[in-house]
Image (tube, rainbow, N blue to C red):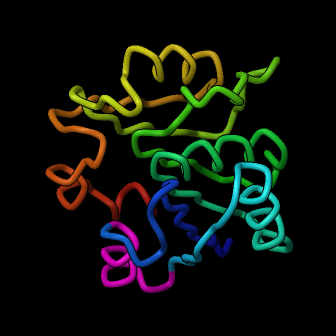
Amino acid sequence: MNTTLLFLHGLDSSAQGTKGRWFARHFPAMLRRDYHGDLTARLEQLAKQCRGLSPLILVGSSFGGLMATIHCCRQPWQCHRLILLAPALNFAEFVPPAVKITTPTRIIIGKHDTVTPPDLVLPLAEQTFAALIITLVDDDHMLATVFPQLDWHEMLA
């Protein structure tokens, strides 16, 4: 099984942001691209990019985590695993699915996150994912302290 790794950046970031550059250095096979526009436009860009790729491990940061979640709701057979970094599940347009997503999902979120506060995001995550691992870390929304220290080789294996 040849798994495709895909990084989805946040709303005000790009594939060349801090996390995108880090993945380019440490996991050069990971696909990265810039997404533009509103949520609908970005989801269309993602769906087009993912056409014919399966299985996927989607790594989504903030708004990219929201995109990964919605893509997995729409195309669950395509998604092998989700790794969501401070996912923007508290975005007004997001509604948890009627049936929980069974794709194994890990959420890493900072205790001091004021953009995607854990007290808002985690209840939505628990309504959304059936196979969920939550890692609450001593960091803020950017996860700048813990991000490079995470066991990415294990999570992306």
Q: Is residue 23 magenta?
A: yes
**Residue 125: quadrant of the picture:** top right
Residue drawn at (32%, 32%) of the image: 135
Range drawn in magenta: 19-29
Magenta-colored segment: predominant secondary structure: helix
Q: Position of residue 77 (x, y in %)?
A: 82, 50
Above/below status of 47 relative to 144: below
Q: Where is residue 115 in the image (x, y as percent from the top left)?
A: 38, 33
Q: Where is residue 43 in the image (x, y as percent from the top left)?
A: 76, 55
Residue 100 as seen in the image, left or right of residue 154? right
Residue drawn at (17%, 57%) of the image: 149
Q: Nearer the viewer, residue 2 or 122?
A: 122
Above/below status of 83 relative to 24: above
Residue 19 as seen in the image, left or right of residue 77? left
Residue 25 as seen in the image, left or right of residue 76? left
Above/below status of 62 relative to 32: above
